[in-house]
Every structure is written in structure tokens, then in C-alpha cells.
């Protein structure tokens, strides 16, 4: 029966290539937008509705849901490992064993940074009512990220789905693999490359910083005696110092894109060209590498080109080592593995 269904899907794909977009996964299996069309046809509308409600209540949530997907995919692949809560383990040696999860939520990149878990809980609860144990938490993250971008005025794309959820987390991987605001450009390039993403993907996905906020502690060192402070517009730096003092104020929030902070557009790249990028990892894209500088200028000049590449790079990022077939599981609660 399963073999027949697979052959039917492949036959349809060959006959109508413009309708079905497969994403081949290097370790086997396929992701494709129509994965839930029969098993849970209302899945996308349920997710879109709850994301819209969440963003209407809190405009920051669009960036938060996008960040959840990004931080998930860069650790063990796009498998919803970031959503797992602590469950008794004390170190990564026990990760993956039953009831012994060291949550990635406690990593340096995630502490006081990632948010939106309650929105994912709401989505999962609604989906479990509509179609129990069908839609994975990993796919919820990917679809919620896309919907967040659209609701913020950005591009839309068909999200290939069919991911399954991990049976463990990696606190060590979260601390090591997620690009940090103060990483060198070469370090960031390497972290992207290790996940199959190139320089074009790096610059395009960095454009996600056209929405959202960053804490003072994320960029403070570049304001006070850091070697990168000559990369920042002096007036802009002075304005930042007002609410990001040398001592204290670490949790104060600042817009990543001070021009249109709630709108997904290409002003982020124009800010970089004006030396008004908030994070070191932002501004170095237009200071230290000829190729990244060229791409920044291209996106600053043409929003359509940015939107097109951002969509492609999001699909590519969503293909990082997903669990497919019979690997992993479909969790009932995104916070814990199923027994």
C-alpha cells in the first residue's frame, strides 16, 4: 500500500513538474509542499491563522518565529530539537536517551533570545485536535517562519514538508554551531558552509534582520573600544550608547533595522551601506569581503532580487538534515519526546 502511494506521487510529479516541488534530501527521502494534502489538508490554514493572531498581539513574534526555525536548523538539522524541554539529563552524553534531554533552550545563543514557544504549543494543540499525530513540530517551525515573513510584508514560497521530530537535543551543538553576533566573518561563513549554505545564502538570510530586535549585550562591545567601532556611523553609535551604556542596560532592546523595524523589506542592506548595521555580524558583510559587499549592494538596489533569493535560501536552509521516513517521530507535544 505504501509502495503504491509512493509510486503514485512520483508519477504525478513527473507528469506535472510545475505543480509539485520536491526537495531531495542528501540522506534519503523527499520533502514536498503537498505532504499533508490528504492526511491533514487544513494544516497550513490552522498554522497561518494562529501565527496571524500571535503577531497581531505582539509584532515582535514574526521575527521570533523566524529565529526559532533558524536556530533549530543549525543544530542537528531541522528536526524541532530546539523545542524540547529539559528532562532530567545533566550533560550531552545522555542526550537522546529516554527522559534525559538537555534542552537547547539553555545555550548561550538561545538564553533570553529565542521565544515564541507558546505560539508553537498553540499551533500543535490545534493540529492535534484536527489531525492527531500527523503534522510534525519541525514542519510547524518551517511553516510558521514562512507565514511570519509574509505577514510582515515579505515574500511567500511553497514550503517543502514531511520532516519528522528528533528524539534528542544538543546543548553543545547549539553553543557551537549557531552564528554569534560577534563572530568573525570567516567563522560565520564556515558555520554556514558546514550546513551546506554558501555566501549568497549567508547574505540573503542575514536579511531576516530587517525585522526584530537585539539586546544591548549583543553589540555593546563594538560601541566601547572594540576594534569594529570604526565601522559604525558615529552619530548612529552615539544614539545607541544612550540606551546601551558601558555598564548596565544589557537587556535593553534595539531594532535590528531602525528605518522600517516592523516591515520585511530591503532597508537592512541600505543600512549596512550607511554603516548603520546594529550587530558586528551585520556590518562586516559590507566591510570585509568583496563578494558579500557586492551582494549587499545588489539587494539594497533591488528588493525583488533579495526577496527571490531569500525564499530560495529559506527552502535550502529548511533542507538541512531533516528526519524523514521512519526516522524520528511525530510528537504530540513539541516539548517532549513520545514514549
Image (spheres, rainbow, N blue to C red):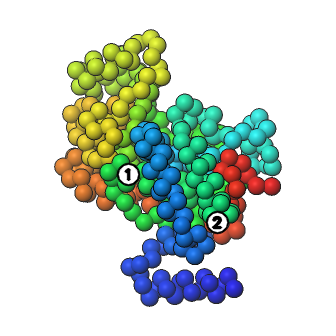
Instruction: Please tell me in which quadrant of the rendered image residue 85 appears.
Output: top right
- Asked if residue 127 is positioned above or below residue 3 in the image, the reply reads above
Instruction: Please tell me in which quadrant of the rendered image residue 210 appears.
Output: top left
Q: Residue 175 vs residue 298: left or right?
A: right
Q: Looking at this view, is 125 or 2 the one in front?
A: 125
Q: Residue visible at 53% across and 38% down?
A: 114
Q: Residue 141 vs residue 311: left or right?
A: right
- Asked if residue 101 is positioned above or below residue 107 in the image, the reply reads below
**Residue 79 picture location, percent across and down:** 61, 55
| Number of marks | 2
On the image, numbered disc 1 is attached to which residue? 151
Find residue 1 and name its label. none
Q: Residue 10 vs residue 299: left or right?
A: right
Gap between marks 1 and 2 measured at Cα: 25 Å
- Asked if residue 189 is positioned above or below residue 9 in the image, the reply reads above
Instruction: Please tell me in which quadrant of the rendered image residue 102 appears.
Output: top right
**Residue 80 picture location, percent across and down:** 61, 52
Find residue 131 and name its label. 2
Q: Residue 259 vs residue 131: left or right?
A: left
Is residue 275 visible in the rendered structure shown here?
yes
Alpha-carbon neighbours of circle 2 within 10 Å: few (<14), some, or many (≥20)?
Answer: some
Alpha-carbon neighbours of circle 1 within 10 Å: few (<14), some, or many (≥20)?
Answer: some
Q: Residue visible at 44% across and 39% down?
A: 58
Label whose residue precedes the other's in the sequence (1 or 2): 2
Q: Residue visible at 61% across and 48% down?
A: 121
Amino acid at each position: 500500500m505504501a509502495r503504491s502511494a509512493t509510486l503514485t506521487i512520483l508519477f504525478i510529479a513527473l507528469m506535472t513538474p510545475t505543480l509539485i516541488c520536491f526537495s531531495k534530501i542528501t540522506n534519503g527521502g523527499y520533502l514536498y509542499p503537498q505532504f499533508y494534502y490528504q492526511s491533514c489538508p487544513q494544516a497550513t490554514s490552522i498554522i497561518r491563522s494562529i501565527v496571524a493572531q500571535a503577531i497581531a498581539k505582539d509584532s515582535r513574534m514574526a521575527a521570533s518565529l523566524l529565529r526559532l526555525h533558524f536556530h533549530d536548523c543549525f543544530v542537528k538539522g531541522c528536526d524541532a530539537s530546539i523545542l524540547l524541554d529539559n528532562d532530567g539529563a545533566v550533560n550531552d552524553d545522555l542526550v537522546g536517551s529516554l527522559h534525559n534531554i538537555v534542552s537547547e533552550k539553555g545555550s548561550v545563543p538561545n538564553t533570553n533570545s529565542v521565544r515564541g514557544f507558546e505560539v508553537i504549543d498553540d499551533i500543535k494543540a490545534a493540529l492535534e485536535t484536527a489531525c492527531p499525530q500527523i503534522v510534525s513540530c519541525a514542519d510547524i517551525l518551517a511553516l510558521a517562519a514562512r507565514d511570519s515573513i509574509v505577514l510582515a510584508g515579505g515574500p511567500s514560497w511553497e514550503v517543502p514538508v514531511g520532516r519528522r521530530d528528533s528524539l534528542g537535543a544538543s546543548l553543545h551543538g547549539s553553543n557551537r554551531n549557531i552564528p554569534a553576533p560577534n563572530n568573525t566573518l570567516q567563522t560565520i561563513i564556515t558555520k554556514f558552509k558546514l550546513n551546506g549554505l554558501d555566501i549568497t545564502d549567508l547574505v540573503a538570510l542575514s536579511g531576516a534582520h530587517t525585522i526584530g530586535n537585539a539586546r544591548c549585550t549583543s553589540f555593546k562591545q563594538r560601541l566601547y573600544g572594540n576594534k569594529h567601532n570604526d565601522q559604525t556611523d558615529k552619530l548612529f553609535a552615539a544614539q545607541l550608547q544612550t540606551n546601551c551604556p558601558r555598564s548596565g542596560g544589557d537587556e535593553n532592546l534595539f531594532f535590528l533595522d531602525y528605518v522600517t523595524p516592523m516591515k520585511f523589506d530591503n532597508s537592512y542592506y541600505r543600512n549596512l551601506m550607511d554603516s548603520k548595521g546594529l550587530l558586528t555580524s551585520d556590518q562586516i558583510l559590507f566591510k570585509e569581503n568583496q563578494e558579500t559587499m557586492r551582494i549587499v549592494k545588489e539587494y539594497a538596489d533591488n528588493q525583488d532580487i533579495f526577496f527571490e533569493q531569500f525564499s530560495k535560501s529559506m527552502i535550502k536552509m529548511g533542507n538541512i538534515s531533516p528526519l524523514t521516513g521512519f526516522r524520528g517521530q511525530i510528537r504530540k507535544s513539541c516539548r517532549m519526546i513520545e514514549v
